[in-house]
Image: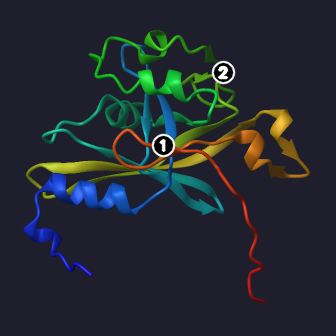
Amino acid sequence: MLSIDPASLSERENYKFLIGSIIPRPIAFVTTLSKDGVLNGAPFSYFNIVSSNPPMISLSIQRSSGRQKDTARNIIESKQFVVHIVDEQNINKINKTAANLPPDESEIELANLTPVESVKISVPGVNEAKIRMECLLEHSLELGNSDTPGCDLIIGKVVQFHIESDIYENGRIDPRGLAAVSRLAGNNYAKIGEVFEIERPK
């Protein structure tokens, strides 16, 4: 077995080890509003649950050469965002939103996604997702060295769930109906695949 000190590697080499090892990763499609009212949308696979009481999720938004991404800047300024679950039906449109657009151009328009009003926040979501979560910013943290932070860690509190009724029954979400897509490394993604059950010890 290889044993490697990450301090001896470049950022790119560490990145490849992390994204190749920590798989599959759920993908959040995040919508935000800029100060000028532009609806921004971008996918992130450094995403997960933080807490269920209260319901909170995390996003880690990587910087490029220390430069904050539009999504992170918009969340920190407006304190609001919407997280959508990426699925087999919307993955191609969502993939288009990963394009590097200037801040005054909307990825939502580029990908021909349909904005839908939120209930508790001013940031719209998109209609093409089976699940979306309206979030308020709980915490933001710059991570990395103090001169050039490498990422913005965002903790959001979910204030409203929107779930397609076809995939919801008795308080549970049908994983096959949701058909969530996960991120692997490179250009690779994965579907749910085989589902198996193991009883947890008492």
Residue that carries the numbered disc 2 in the rendered image: 127
Q: Quadrant of the N terminus?
A: bottom left
Q: Residue 189 carries which label?
A: 1
Residue flagged by tag 2: what amino acid is it?
Answer: Asn
Q: Where is residue 156 in the image (x, y as percent from the top left)?
A: 51, 48
Is residue 171 left or right of 59 when viewed as pictured?
A: right
User: Mark 1 or 2, which is nearer the eye?
Assistant: 1
Residue located at (70% from left, 32% from top): 130
Dot 2, how many residues are within 10 Å of its Cα: few (below 14), some (14-19), or many (20+)?
some
Is residue 106 left or right of 94 when viewed as pictured?
A: left
Q: Which mark is residue 1?
A: none
Q: Quadrant of the C terminus?
A: bottom right
Residue located at (42% from left, 21% from top): 96
Residue flagged by tag 1: what amino acid is it?
Answer: Tyr
Residue located at (34% from left, 37% from top): 72
> At numbered mark 2, what does the secondary structure look like: helix, strand or loop?
loop
Is residue 140 left or right of 53 when viewed as pictured?
A: left
Q: Do the residues labelled 1 and 2 touch (CB within 8 Å)?
A: no
User: How are the residues colored?
Assistant: rainbow
Q: Which of marks 1 and 2 is nearer the N terminus?
A: 2
Residue 144 lies, with reference to residue 197, above or below; the image says: above
Residue 41 seen anywhere in this rendered image of the structure: no
